Amino acid sequence: MQRKPKIAFFDFAGCEGDQLQVANLEETLLDVLGHVEVVSFREVMTGHSDNYDIALVEGSITRPEDEERLKQIRANAKILVAFGACATIGGVNTMKNFMSETMYRRQVYGDNARCYDTYAARPLSAVVKVDAEIHGCPIDRNEFLRITKDLLIGKRPFVPDYPVCAECKQVGNICRYDLGQLCLGMITRAGCGACCITEGAHCWGCRGLAPMANLDAARYVMEERAGYSRSEVQDLLRIFLSHTTAPL
Amino acid sequence: MSAKKVKTTEPKAAAPVATCASCTDPALAAEAEGKKTIRVHHVTRVEGHGNIVVVIGENNAVETVRWEVPEAPRFFEAILQGRSYKDVHQIVSRICGICSIGHQLSSLQATEDAMNIRISTQTVTLRKLAIHAENLQSHLLHLAYLVLPDLMGVNSVIPLAETHKPQLVGLIGLRRLANEFSRIICGRTTHPQRMVPGGFTKLPTEEELLQLMQSFRDSVPGFKEAANLFASLAGKFPDFKRETEYVGLVSPSEYALYRGEVGSTDDSRKPASFYKDVTQEYCVPQSTAKWTRNKRDSFMVGALSRYKLNHTHLKPLAQDVAKLVGLTPKTVNPFHNNLAQLVECVHSVEDSMELIDNLLTNGIKREKAPVIRPRAGRGVGAVEVPRGILFHSYEYDAKGRMVEADCVIPTNMNHANIQKDLEGLVPMIADKSEAEIELITSMLVRAYDPCISCSTHCLDITPNQESKPDRGVRFVYKGR
């Protein structure tokens, strides 16, 4: 009998909604627990250990001291998984990167501002090497299960590299552009089953850019064809996709 | 046992940085002197990061009791600046994974109030269902995963899977129902997509609602079992009493969750737009977060407050469960917040059945979305979320873009009360071992079910100075 792999959960700046999705696995969670040993999961258990094989990390890095903690986690873990949009692409925390940092730092910290460092929010991959990513805001619990299973058997998890539009067509939604709504499905990585569009919203881009996303074409469609202003497009892009070197 | 005077210490910054003189940690110094020191770094089984520091000197004299909040602030009120009213509720949803539905609803109320958008009766009913769904999810998570291990004397829910499998599977089954409920009404359990200013983009089908009704009927025995389980464990809660003020929404006609006026056990009713009168903030030397007070030094919000203010409107089965677990409206034991949560779960199921019945009777139908004409104005939303009353207050410009946002979070209102409770509780248990003190103080914090992710996006880490009327991040554009 092999020893069970040890798993630890960590969180940085975020809403802990992704750990909640793990708790939401309900009965399946008990099955998962039969195959692994959870050594650290602050949201649902007391106790902690620095001896683990897989570290699942949620949240963005927003302070230099977070970097130290993350590097320590990286040093301890054989596999480091970023889960949730905050960890994979910086999430909504990156919206503050477009505002004057000094202004509200002083507002929040007052005279102690020099004691605290806060800097532009960034995903984990901007600080350490990340071995696998579970995308979404929040993550899809079934995808979490699939990727975790893959990691446990030593397989490289499959993550789609095509855009959300492909899945959106599969479930038979009317294109948001035909309904006169702005949508980021065409440049966003698939894997969610186009859940937001199916529920009557539009795609926010929470799974990050699809690797082959043609941004020039997307801009042409949004601005020239559909007639949205630059600022409307940018507003939507800057909710989740702020941390990207792509020319948005 | 008499409560000894608790001395407070110098202000301590939330995340100490060694190079900074004003950020030293007195607990470390006390530890070096060999005093009994309890330092719970990041209390477990709560949402977000909080620390408890207790120093006990000679003859069990309590020297320091401190509740700290070191979570990294995320500046939510700042990032809302200039955002369109269409996106605001989706952004604030991300304040918290557990209370995302409540944040969306409070946000939508504030936006609709500011822009004078009228919503239909059907939308109100669906939103009430959404609140019930979130309450059920959150309370059951708290009771089963976070509180039960303490009562059973284990570190987490994981060992209970072996020792108390049937009870645990029962509770997990109820949670699955709550998650399914949430999915049917809002589209998802966390950061749902269907709710927008003016209504819903997609409605549950009749079949789904009928199925939900049946699931609720089938869940009653499960809730009775959960009630019996907690009734048998109710004696495990420490017998601790402290009078305080209880604040929550009240309504003459129902157990107020989605709509009502701000009520209090010490004060007159006020409309939600007066929220700043109730949540007066002040700075104290030993706390990094601002505290709020109304009539006393602190007040409590949450399930217990709602129960005390609204218990006459509870549904019959919920009344029975309250009797069974020994919860009375006169209780002043903060640990009983856990029991009030259980009572609320049962009430939510009963009330949801009535609301669904009502929807099915009238027939659920697609409605035309109201035409929204952005205009400049202010609006306030107030909703009872699992942890207490939640206010969102917005000011928009004529284009429907955010000028100023203010969110007042229930856990922030509870911080002062947690501190006062700790000050009352620690002297009573000062003769116990460090491990026991750590457990009991952590249990107290857990009883409040604090959601620190929520509360720190508007955390103010200023040392003691004149209380400023503003909160978190403010800037108003001048000379536009």
Image (tube, rainbow, N blue to C red):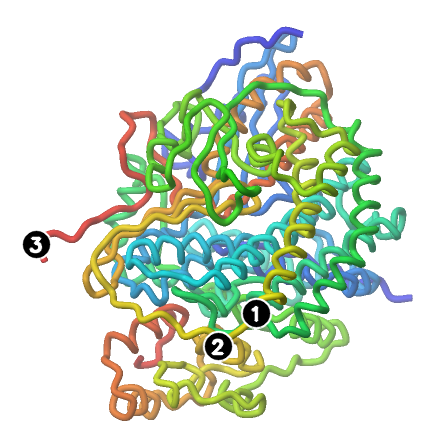
Q: How many marks?
A: 3
Closer mark to the observer between disc 3 and disc 2: 2
Closer mark to the observer between disc 3 and disc 1: 1
Pointer 3 chain = B
Which disc, if any, is residue A190?
none
Check whether the beta carbons of the residues at disc 2 and disc 1 lie within 8 A of each other. yes
Task: Work out whether B96 lies above or below B84.
Answer: above
Q: Are marks 2 and 1 on the same chain?
A: no
Pointer 2 chain = A
Q: Is residue A106 left or right of residue B44?
A: left
Pointer 1 chain = B
For mark 1, what is the residue?
Answer: B187
Q: Residues within 10 Å of mark 3 (few under 14, many from 20)?
A: few
Front residue of A57 and A70: A57
Q: Quadrant of the C terminus of chain B?
A: bottom left
Estimate the x, y position of residue B368 in percent, counting from the top left: 41, 75
Q: Quadrant of the N terminus of chain B?
A: top right
Residue A42 in view: no
For mark 3, what is the residue?
Answer: B479
- What is the residue that sits farthest to the front in this orientation? B361
N-terminal of the two: label 3 or label 1?
A: 1
* Separation of marks 3 and 1 at Cα, in angstroms: 43 Å
Front residue of B18 and A9: A9
For mark 2, what is the residue?
Answer: A200
Estimate the x, y position of residue B329 in percent, counting from the top left: 64, 27
SS of the residue under disc 1: loop
Q: Are marks 3 and 1 on the same chain?
A: yes
Which amino acid lies under the numbered mark 2 shown in the image of this protein? Answer: Gly
Task: Work out whether B421 lies above or below B450.
Answer: above
Which amino acid lies under the numbered mark 3 shown in the image of this protein? Answer: Gly
**Residue B20: quadrant of the picture:** top left
